[in-house]
Image (cartoon, rainbow, N blue to C red):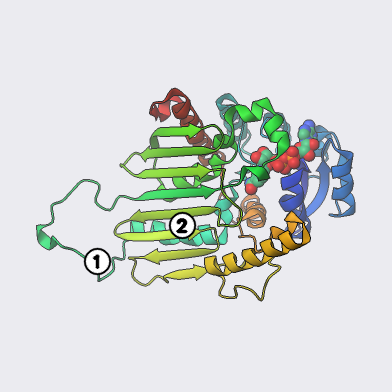
Amino acid sequence: MSTPINFAVIGCGMLARAQHIPNIARSPKTVLHTCCDLSDEALAECRDKHGALHITKDFRAAVNDPEVQAICIATHQTLRLPIIRAAAEVHKPVYCEKPLGNSLEDIYEIGRVVKASGIPFCVGHNRRSSPAMIEGHDIFRSHMKNPKPCPWRFDRGGAERPRLEGDGVPGISVRINDDWYSWKVLFMQDKAIMEQGPMLWEMTHFTDMCNWFIDNEPVEVAAIEHGYFHSGVVIRYKAGEIATIFMCANGTFGYPKELYEAFGNGAAVVVDHMAEVRTAGIEGVPARITYPFLHDRHPNVGKEMGISGWLAKKRAACEEAAAKGDTLLSFTAEPDKGHAHAINRFVDQIRGEGPVVCGVEESIQATRVAFAAIKAARAHRTVKMEEV
Ligand SMILES: NC(=O)c1ccc[n+]([C@@H]2O[C@H](COP(=O)([O-])OP(=O)(O)OC[C@H]3O[C@@H](n4cnc5c(N)ncnc54)[C@H](O)[C@@H]3O)[C@@H](O)[C@H]2O)c1
């Protein structure tokens, strides 16, 4: 086992204290060396609860500390570039939360800085490291490259069937059920963050998943939105592949949040809430695969796991929350969205022992698609990718 890597986490707010800080502290591959935030309360929690060896309010001091070997940025999307620049100057690897930046200028400049310095870089599109997503993606991409058609496909035309352009080309539908009551009030008070809204801060996860599953160049984007609450986005790719993203923020945490349904070459691969993968039309692949949950307070409920298991666990948790008047009790059995794996896999990347997890190029592409969608919704027209 190699010596663990000393991480400095910059921005120790809700996400960092729920994910990166405990994950880095727990992993044998990493050490929680330094925590940096402007809040005394956050820093005290990092030191006393999570065991940070050092705390500071000065991100430059954290980056330049010779003992610090890698940086994790979890500040707001409005503060990325100065930290990345500082890390690039001392050639330290950076894991940066999504969205990569708050403007197109920002993300292009980040791309230039990262490429010029050659530092290992990873963006927190953590779904690329979720076990369910990885397996769903592997099954889907290998069927797209090397189809294993099923013997029962209803082929009415047989040899007479005309050869039509687009036969077999993939498409993906992404459905997001969110509840805006859960959003951070601080975000909603920040004009710079709200200017782009959830179509940037949340949707980059989903544009990234569409790009990853489709594996081709996005060409144009159409979108309609209603305030912060509804958006419908359609992305066309180079070979005619289509992705649709429907995000609704007036939904409920009592139902699974994310549904990805990918189709192509006479097959379906569905990733439901990162709790189960369902497949159809591919020979030799299981019809249903389930994945372990995180923080499952209800191991004896919904033992069948997957979506039906999750729904049973969630119902039990919501009933407890209502009975005890504590809404936090409604959380149980979280799907593994890949946060901890992403940091561990990034360490493998830094050491040259693993692939690039989510590099700057693919992150810029995901963010550009989100910006194209925002522009399309505001201008009420389709936007070509070269416009962004
Ligand atoms: N990948 C995911 O699943 C996921 C989930 C939630 C949030 N996020 C992203 O993580 C980021 C943080 O979100 P959050 O909900 O934790 O926000 P937050 O407001 O809770 O945390 C941000 C922290 O940054 C600190 N900060 C601000 N300026 C700083 C500076 N100059 N130096 C050091 N620290 C500074 C703030 O004090 C705050 O504690 C956002 O970009 C958000 O989009 C990602």
Q: Is residue 78 left or right of residue 3?
A: left
Mark 1 residue crowding within 10 angstroms, few (<14) / some (14–19) / many (20+): few
Residue at 54% across, 40% down: 204
> Which residue is the site of mark 1?
153
Give whichever of 208, 187 is nearer the camera.
187
Q: Is mark 2 within 8 Å of ligand 1?
A: no
38 relative to 31, above or below? above
What percent of the width, then of the height, locates residue 91? Answer: 70, 38
Q: Which quarter of the rendered image does ligand 1 occupy?
A: top right
In the foreground, 275 or 59: 275
Instruction: Quote the CA–CA distance across marks 1 and 2.
Output: 22 Å
**Position of residue 334 measured from the top left corner of the image (x, y, whole percent):** 64, 60
In the rendered image, the vertical position of residue 384 relative to residue 310, given as above or below = above
Q: Quadrant of the N terminus?
A: bottom right
Q: Mark 2 — residue?
A: 137
Classify 145 as above or below 292: above
Q: Measuring from the top left, give residue 37's x and y in whole percent.
A: 82, 38
CB of residue at label 1: within 8 Å of ligand 1?
no
Tell me the element at label 1: loop
Residue 11 relative to residue 368: left or right: right
Q: Amino acid at mark 2?
A: His
> Which numbered tag is attached to residue 219?
none
Hey, which residue is sitting farthest front in the picture?
323
Q: Are marks 1 and 2 in contact (CB under 8 Å)?
A: no
Give the residue type at disc 1: Arg
Q: Nearer the viewer, residue 249 or 191?
A: 249
One can see residue 221 in this view: yes
In the image, which is nearer the foreground, mark 1 or mark 2? Answer: 1
* Residue 261 to residue 378: above or below: below
